[in-house]
């Protein structure tokens, strides 16, 4: 009995500590919100169009840790990675635990393919079109 009570307390403590590191997924004002899922479609919507300077926010609604990036050096299938213009910034969310979000503002027009890593499931690709 004492051991099970101790294990319950450890489990509760672990949940409390881990929740301190999860960023809440509140949508930024005016942001296009893209939801990340464990099942297809992995990104919803898979394609979005914004103007230069408008934010895009990815929200991890899956049960797994994911990252979104257009950094070709992090993509396993490099031949499908988009080349980034010299005026464009590369983005990488870092690992997003379930419930976390990442927001990025595009500063250069163009078409940006991004990927879900580390899993890069087939079809885990999205496209952001940025217009002036």
Image (spheres, rainbow, N blue to C red):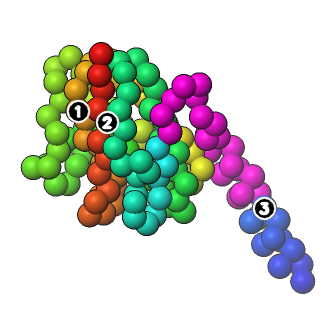
Q: Does label 2 or label 1 sit earlier along the sequence?
A: 1
Would residue 17 be seen by someone viewing this image from the given angle? yes
Q: Where is residue 88 in the image (x, y as percent from the top left)?
A: 24, 22
Q: Quadrant of the N terminus?
A: bottom right
Q: In which quarter of the image is the C terminus?
A: top left
**What is the tally of numbered marks visible in this picture?**
3
Magenta segment boundaries in residue numbering: 13-33
As drawn, 54 above or below 6? above
Residue 12: which numbered mark, if any? 3
Q: Residue at x 22, y 49 (%)?
A: 75
Q: Nearer the viewer, residue 47 or 72?
A: 47
Q: Give the secondary structure at mark 2.
A: strand
Residue 27 belongs to the span the image colors magenta:
yes
Would residue 96 be seen by someone viewing this image from the given angle? no
Pointer 2 residue: 128
The extreme right residue here reads 1
Q: How far apart are marks 1 and 3 (CA)?
A: 45 Å
Quarter where residue 2 is shown: bottom right
Q: Position of residue 78 (x, y in %)?
A: 14, 49
In the image, is 25 to the left or to the right of 93?
A: right
């Amino acid at each position: 009995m004492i051991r099970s009570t101790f294990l319950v307390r450890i489990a509760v403590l672990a949940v409390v500590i881990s929740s301190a590191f999860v960023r809440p997924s509140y949508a930024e004002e005016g942001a296009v919100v893209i939801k990340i899922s464990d099942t297809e479609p992995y990104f919803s919507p898979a394609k979005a169009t914004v103007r230069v300077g408008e934010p895009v926010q990815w929200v991890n609604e899956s049960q797994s840790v994911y990252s979104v990036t257009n950094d070709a050096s992090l993509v396993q299938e490099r031949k499908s990675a988009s080349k980034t213009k010299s005026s464009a910034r590369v983005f990488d969310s870092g690992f997003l635990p379930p419930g976390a979000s990442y927001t990025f503002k595009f500063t250069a027009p163009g078409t940006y393919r991004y990927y879900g890593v580390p899993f890069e499931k087939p079809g885990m690709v999205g496209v952001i079109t940025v217009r002036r």
